[in-house]
Image (cartoon, rainbow, N blue to C red):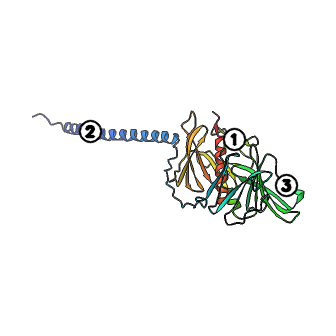
Amino acid sequence: MEPVNPVQPTQQATSGQTIVQRGLLLPVIVVALLLLIVGVGAYYLGRRTQSVPQQSTTPQVAVTSPTIPDSTANWQTYTNQKYNFAIKYPSDWKYIEVPNNKYQTQYDGVWLLPKSSTPPLPNSDGLTVPIALQLSTTDPSINPQFIDNYKSESYLIGILQGKRITGTSKAGMAIDEIVIKANTFYIDAKTHGANFDQILSTFKFTDSTQVTDTSNWKTYASAEYSFAMMYPPQVTHEETLSSTQFNKSHEFFRVDGGTLEIYGVCGRGVQPVKQQDIIIGGQKATKLYATNTNGVITAIPRPNSNESICFNFTLPNDLTKTSSVDALFDKILSTFKFTQ
């Protein structure tokens, strides 16, 4: 009988165990490699995502605010064809154009007075009329030396800047008048009654040639947004740097409690109570009023860029100034132009 080798089964068992261990190890290695690949891919994908700026995705919010009633909606409108302007007055008032056969004034003009009031005496100069608009080619301003307690302050009518003069004449008559120069004539508005500011706030030119003189306006140029725009001296300008990455700055133009804001990356919409088409930088835009005193303007695209310029506006709560400031903002925006 041949001797039995006791070592051989041990070697066979060891070889079998090695094969089994290798069989178990292979899936582990494959899983580890897959996890490594997934981890490295996720890391680089995260780095790439962080390196690409993400534009603001602020949702369009429908803003609905209570509207302020227009107290002049049912008023009558007077239009002057010679001097190309219009002004509204209460429905229970009337107007008288002068001079005429009854009133031989030394100036062209229009008087506004209640229908129930006593008519001025023939050939009177309108000193007792509640509101008298005198139109002339010479400056009608009163010399301060003829007025006691003389005071002069800035005043906006339509989109023109003028001055309001108050005081007392040497004869003891109260003086309250506004003098403004259009391109070709002066407007001298005198009052001896109520509704003065509210009525004058409805004044507007029907001929744009009367308001094209911007010789004394300032110019603001934005290198950041590549535009330039003019604004009158009574308007203040302020630039505010934004805390966000994309809206680098906001430009604010303020006058009489109203604000025009210009910036980049629009993100707010409104449910308008009214709207108005205007031209900005040679492009058509639309003013969307959330209320009678605030709103937005549809964005206009920047040339050679995928970005746009955005506009917000807030008008004075003082309704005697709302229309004039709104018209002034339109005039300012009409000077807007891209510089590249």
Looking at the image, which is closer to me, 230 or 132? 132
Tag shown at residue 23:
2
| Residue 137 image point, x, y percent | 79, 45
| Residue 253 image point, x, y percent | 68, 49
Question: In this rendering, would 96 be left or right of 312?
Answer: right
- Mark 2, residues whose alpha carbon is within 10 Å: few (<14), some, or many (≥20)? few
* Sequence-earlier tag: 1 or 2: 2
On the rendered image, what quadrant is the C terminus found in?
top right
Q: Which amino acid, mark 2? A: Gly
Which element carries disc 3, helix, strand or loop? loop
Q: CA distance from mark 1 to mark 2?
A: 94 Å
Q: CA distance from mark 3 to mark 1?
A: 27 Å
Is residue 184 positioned above or below 197 on the image? above
Residue projecting furthest to the left: 1
Q: Quadrant of residue 258?
A: bottom right
Q: Quadrant of residue 128?
A: bottom right
Tag shown at residue 209:
1
Q: Which amino acid, mark 3? A: Ile
- Mark 3, residues whose alpha carbon is within 10 Å: few (<14), some, or many (≥20)? some
Looking at the image, which is closer to me, 311 or 210? 210
* Sequence-earlier tag: 3 or 2: 2
Q: Quadrant of residue 168?
A: bottom right
| Residue 112 image point, x, y percent | 70, 59
Is residue 227 visible in the rendered structure shown here?
yes
